[in-house]
Amino acid sequence: MGLFSWFKKKKKDEEVVATPVQETPVVEEAPAPAEEPAPAPAPTLVEEPAPAPAPAPVEEPAPAPAPAPVKEAAPVKKAAPAPKPAPAKVAPAKEEAPAPEAAPVAESKTLSGKDDSVIVRLVKTEKPAEEPAPAPAPAPVVEEGPKVLGKYEFDLAPDGYRFYLVANNGQLLYESIGFTSMEGAVVGIDTFRRAVEGGNFAVISDKYNRYRFVLNRKYYGENYSTRAQCEKCVESVKRFAPDAVVAEFTPTEEQIATFTAAKASLRTVKDVDWDAVEQREAAAAKLGKFEISREEDKEYRFYLVANNGQVLYTGKNYQKLCQCLAGIKSFKRAVYVGNFSIDQDKFGRFRYILKNIGVAPAFMGESYTTRKQCESSIESVKNFVVTAEIEVPE
C-alpha cells in the first residue's frame, strides 16, 4: 500500500467514525419532541384524532423509553371520556322528559336555559288551579241568609193592631203599641226599621234592677233581669229587624168584635166628675206612692208602688223632673177615665192596656202569667192612684 492509499483509507475511517457522532445527537434530540406530547392535551379540547399520529414518530427513534411518555399521555386521552356525557345533552332524555306526566316541573329543572320558558309557563298554568276564584261564589249565599231571619207578626188587641219582632227561636224582641188599622201597623214597621238602622239604643236600669232598651226615646223593649241579657236583646234586634219577613195576618171575627166593642165603649174626660175626684183624693188616707227616681242615665222615671212594694206601673224616661211630674198627672187622668183592657199576647202573657187621652200612646202595664193576676193589678192601680203620694228625689 502506498502512501496515497493509506491516506485515503484513513480519510474514509474518519468519515465512518464521524458518521455515528452525527447520528447520536439525532437520537438524543428525538426524545425532545416526545416531551412535547404533554402539551398535546390542548388538542383534546377539539376532541379530534389528530394528535394520534404524533406518537407514531416517537415510537420509531426510541423503542423502549419512548413508549413511556406515550403511556403517560394515554391517561389524558382517558380523561377525554369525561366529555362523552356531553352527548347526554343531546341524548333523547330531552324528548323523554315531557313523557312523564307525574312531575314535568321536576325534570324541567335540569333543562338548559333555552327551556327555562317552559318552567315559567308551567307556573302560570298552576296559578289558575289554586281555586280561590270559586270561593266568592258561596258568599252571596251567606249574604242572602240573614234576609230570611226573624219575622214581624201581627195581632189585633183591644187597643188596636200591634206588630211583634220575633227571632227564629221564638223569642220576643219587641212589641209595639196599638195602631188603629193594619196599614198603620205596617207603616209602623218601616219607621221602626229606620230607627234600628240609626242605632240610637240605650240600655237603662231601674231601682228594681230591671233592664230594658230604649230606642230613639220612643221604643221601649222588654224587661230583663240582667244587663247582659238586655244587651244581647239589642244585638238581636239590630240583626233581625232590617230583614225580618213581614208575615201575613187576617184577624179573626172574635178579635174584630172585641176591638170594635172597645172603641165603642171608650170613655172620655167629659164622662168624669173631676170635682168629685179631688174631694176623694183629699179625704183618702195616704197609701202607696208615686216614686220618682233619677236613673243611672240621669233621666227621671216614676213608679206606682203598692204598700207591699209591688210595682203596679213603670213610666217611661223623662229628661226633666217637670216632664216626669206631667207624666204622672197624665197617667192619673187616664186611670180615672178608666179605659182599661186586658190583652193576652201571642206568647200567653197577660197585661193591661190603659188607653190614653186623645191620640197619645196607651199605657201598658206589667206582664202577668194569669188573667186573674192582671185583673187584680188593675183594681190596685185604680185604688192607689187616689191615695198615692208623690215622692220627689232630693
Image (cartoon, rainbow, N blue to C red):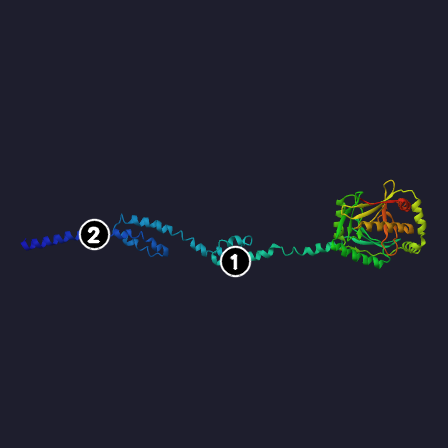
Which of 51 and 323 lies nearest the eye of the viewer?
323
The three-letter code of the residue at mark 2 reads: Pro
Q: Which residue is mark 1?
A: 118
Task: From the top left corner, tell me how far across and down residue 379 is, in percent.
Answer: 91, 45
Q: Is residue 31 left or right of residue 197?
A: left
Q: Earlier in the sequence, mark 1 or mark 2?
A: 2
Residue 162's mark?
A: none
Q: Which quadrant, please, contains the C terminus?
A: top right
Which of 53 and 221 lies nearest the eye of the viewer?
221
Q: Which residue is mark 2?
A: 25
Task: From the top left corner, tell me how far across and down residue 110 is, in percent.
Answer: 49, 53
Residue at 78% across, 55% down: 192
Give the image quarter of residue 358: bottom right
Q: Is residue 308 left or right of residue 244?
A: right
Spatial CA span between label 1 and label 2: 66 Å
Task: From the top left corner, tell me how far across and down residue 9 is, in percent.
Answer: 10, 53
Is disc 2 placed on a helix, strand or loop? helix
The three-letter code of the residue at mark 1 reads: Val
Residue at 23% across, 52% down: 29
Residue at 45% across, 54% down: 88
Q: Is residue 57 left or right of residue 283?
A: left
Which of 328 and 102 lies nearest the eye of the viewer?
328
Task: From the top left corner, tell me how far across and down residue 74 is, in percent.
Answer: 34, 50
Numbered disc in front, either 1 or 2: 1
Number of other residues with Cα within 10 Å of mark 2, as a class: few under 14, some 14 to 19, many 20 or more: few
Give the image quarter of residue 89: bottom left
Is disc 1 placed on a helix, strand or loop? helix
Residue at 54% across, 58% down: 121
Q: Is residue 8 visible?
A: yes
Q: Is residue 345 visible?
A: no
Q: Disc 1, disc 2: CB below 8 Å?
A: no
